[in-house]
Amino acid sequence: MRYSSPVAVENRIVKVQKRNRALVRFDESRIGDAILGALQSIGGARYDFLPGINEAVFQAHGSDTQIARFLSDTAVVCLNANPYHLISNFPPTIETIQDAVLHALRSHGFQKTADAYATHRWGRHWLREGALNETQFLGNGQTHASERAAADWNRSHNCHTVAGLNSIVRSGRISHLIEASIARYEAELDAAADNVLARLNGGQPLRLLWITGPTSSGKTTTTVKLTQRLARHGLRFLMLNLDDYFWPLVEHPTDWINDRNYETPEALDIQLLNEHLRALLAGQTIEKPVYNFIEGRRGGSKSIRLEPDQILLLDCLHGLYPPMTEGIDASAQFRLFVEARNLLMEGDGTTHQFTRFNDVRLLRRMLRDLHHRNHSPLRTLLHWHYVRSGELFSILPLRGLADQVINAGFPFDLPLLQPFFTGPDGIWPAAAELDLFPGFLDARIRHQRLEPLLAGIAGLTRQQVADTTLLPGDAVLREFVGGGSLSIPHNK
């Protein structure tokens, strides 16, 4: 990468501290190369263009290389703001520099690039730690095979664009799409059950079954439906509720809007959990904590033991997080990763811009939080930056560790979610509500992106969504829109 910029940025940082603590010459071009690589990995900077957010950056810097230089300069300015970095024996570390890069990207609205950079960063971290091998390392997190499969399925059913999806809804063909989509998901569940049974029948000592994946991807419904299948083959389970391992509230500091970060694995007592997992697998009885959510602390304990013919069942965001299963043989575990991946192109597809399937999970969680957590949609929106930070550190970069992946994202999600967010009694936050939080750029960007999408989707009515002849009671989406026939523990 060769820079030529009319703008001069002061830099008095001479050295950088490597991870082995060695001091080497500070080279800004390496920062620019990394940013340019992240930009190119998402298809170019144009995929992060946001009117009213970063259009001035694009007007001033025409090419991806120039934009990368600008963002690199921004990171350098941030690094120089710390006077300790200007002392030769206290230079910034590699991790500090990477933090500054992410700050520069997110501060200018380059969300997708920042996500790609963070996923690659933490994937390399887990590779160095030995938790991943080169085959399991997923780079910027884009899993091309699964994305291609999801895109091909949608295209074959004429629901790969918003225009095509709207045509299906308006012509009354949504019931056929729902039926076909659920059949695809159920077939993946059947394959997962077959793989678990094959492991057991092959003589492997399978003792732990993890259902893991990002928030609101449909893990709990998948857990219930998978264990129902396995129970028909005589398998017995002991479910361990990992929410009981949360630290007390006093150990979860709040930010200035009184929000807490429960999305990081460190929100759990990982050391105690790991000790208990190993003890249970050794046939010992443990005193499992019982968390009192009203008081925000552990309120006692319960004696439990894993019987020899039982499998320990865990539904958890961070089921792939290496410290959680340290010392436990991988052959004793089956790890199912649940994602909500639906590739839908904006408009009629001519812009080649995709809607964000992560935004659909945000809508799902808004409904769940409103009805079962007493959290307003605005609060969920303001909290989402914590969600993404946790996912990009300890969930998405570790996806390659999964024994199997199930896609619980559906092309009918948006038409069935839309009636809850639009109209006179819709729960979508008004733009004016964000005026009190001008510094929350992440929330503003997501609001700005989702509001026109919701307005442009041909939605059903709430009465139609409530009809179980249209959307079955055991469908994944029932976990969020209500009216389900399955018992969802976290919704009680």
Image (cartoon, grey):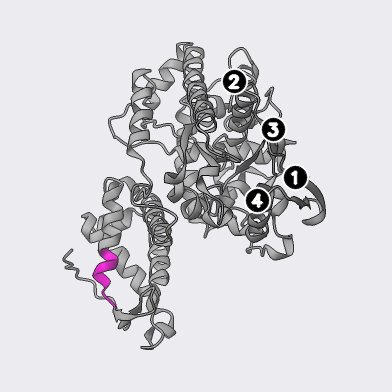
Inter-mark Cα distance, 1 to 3 = 23 Å
Q: Which mark is residue 488?
A: 3
Q: Which mark is residue 305?
A: 1
Q: Which mark is residue 277?
A: 4
Rendered-image quadrant of the N terminus: bottom left
Q: Amino acid at mark 3?
A: Ile
**Where does residue 148 sit, x and y in percent of width and height?**
33, 32
Q: Amino acid at mark 4?
A: Leu
SS type, badge 3: loop
Q: Residues within 10 Å of mark 2 (few under 14, many from 20)?
A: some
**Tag in front: 3 or 4:** 4
Rendered-image quadrant of the C terminus: top right
Image position of 466 (left or right of 417) = right
SS type, badge 2: loop
Specify the segment rendered in magenta: 26-32
Q: Residues within 10 Å of mark 1 (few under 14, many from 20)?
A: some
Inter-mark Cα distance, 1 to 4 = 10 Å
SS type, badge 1: strand
Instruction: State if disc 3 and disc 2 touch (CB < 8 Å).
Output: no
Q: Earlier in the sequence, mark 1 or mark 3?
A: 1
Instruction: State if disc 1 and disc 2 touch (CB < 8 Å).
Output: no
Which residue lies under the disc numbered 2? Answer: 461
Q: Which mark is residue 89?
A: none
Q: Amino acid at mark 1?
A: Arg
Q: Main secondary structure of the magenta part?
A: helix
